[in-house]
Image (cartoon, grey):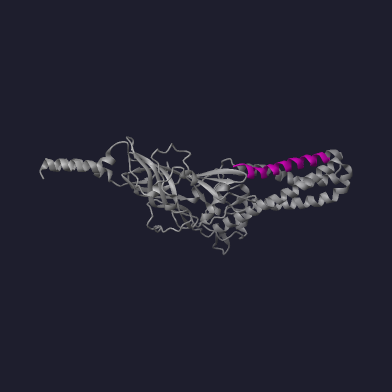
């Protein structure tokens, strides 16, 4: 019985810390663990969405835990493979074009394009779009995506340059409209800079309209969608503005003031829509 | 040793065996998310992935032996703006390195408490984050709770994208900030 009692006491002592409710696991008492909880703040980490940490919290010395950027040896990918885990291999892009039975270039059977492409993208880059029909498309979807990124980056850059040119042109037009003398002095310059602005604008627009399709398109509203809706307004206005400018200078049938007012207000709306389209990309999420 | 002694020993050892049991679980993708909050000089945004997979294995009595693996497809992050998500995939070389992987190499429980509900506390999880073709070691503060067979963990930490060799993408000439805040919410059912 004494042996039995001894065994029971030994086992109870072994299990006590784990089995007793509301018991704290004792963390090794090395000096590395004697750091104040404020280390959380100094390490720029936090638990803003979490409940209060227990009072017993004592953090290890961050220097003992390694630093971001340190080299580390990890298990190989094969060792960390999990059933049903996502594929770790690079995305394989099938050829986007193939030579058909007639010896002509045609979209590859394996070519997968995103659903819900805008109509202008489908017109150029759809399975039977103009670019593919002419055999001008890159040989793979990867090439298309790289081309798209490059075109959209240039679209952004040229968009800013165009906005600067448009602003100058807009201000010049307002000055001319208010002062008949300036109208006579700046007429030729306004016409020349107008053609330049128009060319810059169309170049900027074509970089976006002609870009290959992205990875996915959804129907959700976003800042990019608003940017596109505003583009419908400023594209229409920009297409009409040079014609209206010529109509102001050489038109007949209506009074000069009516023609000038029409040109002025179409340009104002166009400039406002263009500026708003630019602002949506900067300011909206 | 008589039968009574043997029986009593078995009864006393049973709780020990139960506590020493190593539990494993697979991340529940329906309840697990990984989100990043990024900052541009003119606006902030947040994108969330709901395609988190991974495993967790540990013994609640000795969590320092725990191991955690997490995987998230790069293309699964959704910020509500397809164009921006597309741009981010390009920026983080998502076609060449389509998956973000975190594999723990060391777990240090800094507070680990048992209550009537189960276990809870904070772990400092050290491991390698594989992202954009580079592996960076980092130590993450993770708040862990175990209620019966339900495992949940949350962590919030900053990463530097340039540490992963990623050039911060820019919009209209302005680059996004290097620091991105990550929020991980993981859930698994333990066996």
* Most common secondary structure along the magenta stretch: helix
Q: Position of residue A39 (x, y in %)?
A: 46, 45
Specify the farthest residue to the left. Answer: B2
Name the residue rendered at 37%, 57% in the picture: A79
Foreground residue among B116 and A99:
B116
B184 left or right, relative to A231 = left
Specify the farthest residue to the bottom. Answer: A103
Foreground residue among B43 and A108:
B43
Viewer can see residue B54: no
A37 left or right, relative to A186 = left
Q: Is residue B55 magenta?
A: no
Name the residue rendered at 56%, 54% in the picture: B91
Range of magenta residues: A259-285
Q: Position of residue B74 (x, y in %)?
A: 49, 51
Name the residue rendered at 85%, 48% in the picture: A187
When asked about the image quadrant of residue A181, the answer is top right
A241 left or right, relative to A88 = right
Foreground residue among A30 and A16:
A30
Q: Position of residue B180 (x, y in %)?
A: 53, 48
Specify the farthest residue to the top. Answer: B116
Q: Position of residue B26 (x, y in %)?
A: 37, 46
- In the rendered image, the quadrant that contains the C terminus of chain A is top right
- In the rendered image, the quadrant that contains the N terminus of chain A is top left
Tell me how many marks there are: 0
Q: Is residue A268 magenta?
A: yes
Viewer can see residue A57: yes
């Amino acid at each position: 019985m004494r042996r039995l009692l001894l065994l029971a006491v030994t086992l109870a002592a072994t299990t006590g810390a784990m089995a007793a409710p509301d018991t704290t696991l004792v963390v090794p008492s090395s000096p590395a663990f004697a750091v104040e909880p404020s280390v959380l703040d100094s390490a720029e980490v936090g638990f803003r969405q979490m409940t209060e940490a227990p009072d017993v919290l004592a953090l290890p010395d961050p220097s003992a835990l390694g630093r971001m950027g340190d080299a580390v040896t990890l298990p190989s990918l094969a060792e960390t493979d999990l059933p049903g885990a996502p594929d770790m291999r690079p995305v394989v892009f099938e050829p986007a074009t193939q030579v058909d039975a007639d010896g002509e270039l045609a979209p590859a059977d394996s070519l997968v394009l995103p659903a819900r492409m805008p109509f202008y993208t489908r017109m150029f880059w759809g399975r039977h779009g103009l670019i593919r029909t002419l055999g001008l498309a890159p040989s793979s979807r990867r090439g298309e995506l790289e081309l798209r990124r490059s075109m959209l980056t240039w679209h952004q850059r040229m968009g800013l340059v165009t906005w600067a040119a448009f602003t100058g042109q807009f201000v010049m037009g307002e000055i001319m409209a208010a002062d008949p003398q300036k109208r006579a002095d700046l007429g030729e310059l306004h016409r020349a800079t107008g053609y330049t602005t128009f060319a810059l604008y169309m170049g900027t627009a074509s970089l976006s309209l002609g870009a290959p399709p992205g990875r996915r398109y959804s129907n959700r509203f976003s800042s990019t969608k608003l940017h596109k809706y505003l583009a419908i307004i400023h594209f229409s206005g920009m297409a009409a503005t040079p014609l209206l400018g010529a109509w102001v200078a050489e038109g007949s049938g209506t009074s000069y003031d009516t023609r000038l007012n029409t040109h002025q207000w179409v340009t104002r709306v166009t400039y406002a829509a263009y500026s708003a389209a630019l602002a949506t990309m900067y300011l909206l999420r | 040793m008589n039968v009574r002694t043997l029986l009593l020993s078995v009864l006393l050892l049973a709780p020990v065996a139960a506590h020493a049991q190593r539990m494993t679980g697979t991340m529940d993708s329906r309840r697990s998310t990984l989100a990043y909050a990024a900052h541009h000089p003119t606006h902030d945004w947040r994108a969330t992935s709901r395609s988190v997979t991974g495993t967790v294995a540990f013994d609640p009595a000795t969590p320092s032996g725990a191991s955690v693996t997490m995987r998230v497809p790069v293309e699964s992050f959704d910020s509500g703006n397809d164009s921006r998500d597309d741009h981010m995939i390009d920026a983080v070389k998502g076609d060449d390195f389509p998956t973000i992987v975190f594999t723990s190499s060391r777990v240090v429980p800094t507070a680990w408490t048992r209550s009537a509900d189960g276990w809870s506390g904070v772990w400092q999880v050290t491991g390698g984050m594989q992202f954009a073709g580079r592996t960076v070691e980092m130590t993450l503060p993770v708040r862990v709770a175990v209620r019966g067979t339900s495992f949940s963990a949350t962590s919030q930490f900053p990463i530097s994208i340039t540490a992963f060799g990623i050039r911060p993408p820019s919009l209209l000439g302005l680059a996004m900030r290097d620091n991105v805040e990550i929020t991980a919410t993981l859930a698994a059912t333990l066996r």
